[in-house]
Amino acid sequence: MPDLPPMPAPASHTFHETSQTVAELPPVLADHVEGHLAAARGMAALLPSVEAAADLLIATFSGGGTVYTLGNGGSAADAQHLTGELIGHYKRDRRPLPTVTLTTDATVMTCIANDYSYEDVFARQVQALARPGDVVAAFTTSGDSPNVVTALETARSRGAVTVLFGGGDGGAAAKHADHVLLAPSSETPRIQEIHTLMLHMISEKVDAWAAA
């Protein structure tokens, strides 16, 4: 078999190396970049609320409480992301912090959905688990998912503190939230991107406290 010519090295270009500006991107991609930057700039006004949410988690863990997180679809992934940062760690080697995501037990989820309704998949778990001194944190881009709304309502009835990671005006879920963190956008991708920024900022402060 004849020798094959060497494969060319893969091109390695960064955004800056190509000298491509946002304006030179295809319009659909440029819109994503500009929308993300606008939403990120809008975060400045939310910094006190984000810090208050971090302080709430610190007070909850200090008092022996548990944080429960929940959401649907991409928001379920965000809920699990926050739990991972708290049980694992963000940047520092420190003790694990008691956090549970209510989307991860497929047997419980499908049992409740089958025997009751999908609207009850979070509320029934909250009813079973949440106690005064705990926090129930919900991620939702619309704020109107019935299972999220009922979960927050149930959490309050159980004496837990409720936190909403939302967007726009917060939807129906906002009226059941003690702490409301609304991404400055009404577009689902931007809201989810800002939720990630928020949970990283919260994780930074909680992480530093837990490692001290």
Image (spheres, rainbow, N blue to C red):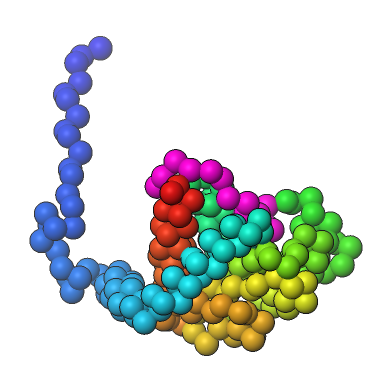
Q: Is residue 49 above or below residue 99?
A: below
Q: Quadrant of residue 197?
A: bottom left
Q: Residue at x 52, y 55 (%)?
A: 81
Q: Is residue 101 magenta?
A: yes
Work out whether residue 84 or residue 92 is closer to the camera in this orientation and state it: 92
Q: Residue at x 56, y 78 (%)?
A: 179
Q: Quadrant of residue 115?
A: bottom right
Q: Magenta span covers which residues?
A: 91-104
Answer yes or no: is residue 197 visible: yes
Q: Position of residue 21 (x, y in %)?
A: 15, 68
Q: Is residue 165 magenta?
A: no
Q: Main SS type for the magenta part? A: loop
Q: Residue at x 59, y 73 (%)?
A: 163
Number of labelled discs?
A: 0
Q: Position of residue 169 (x, y in %)?
A: 52, 87
Residue 21 relative to residue 197: left or right: left
Residue 175 relative to residue 190: left or right: right
Answer yes or no: is residue 203 visible: no
Q: Position of residue 200 (x, y in %)?
A: 42, 60
Q: Position of residue 97 (x, y in %)?
A: 58, 50
Q: Residue furthest right?
A: 115
Q: Quadrant of residue 120?
A: bottom right
State which quarter of the image contains the N terminus. top left
Q: Is residue 90 above or below residue 102?
A: above
Residue 193 relative to residue 1: left or right: right
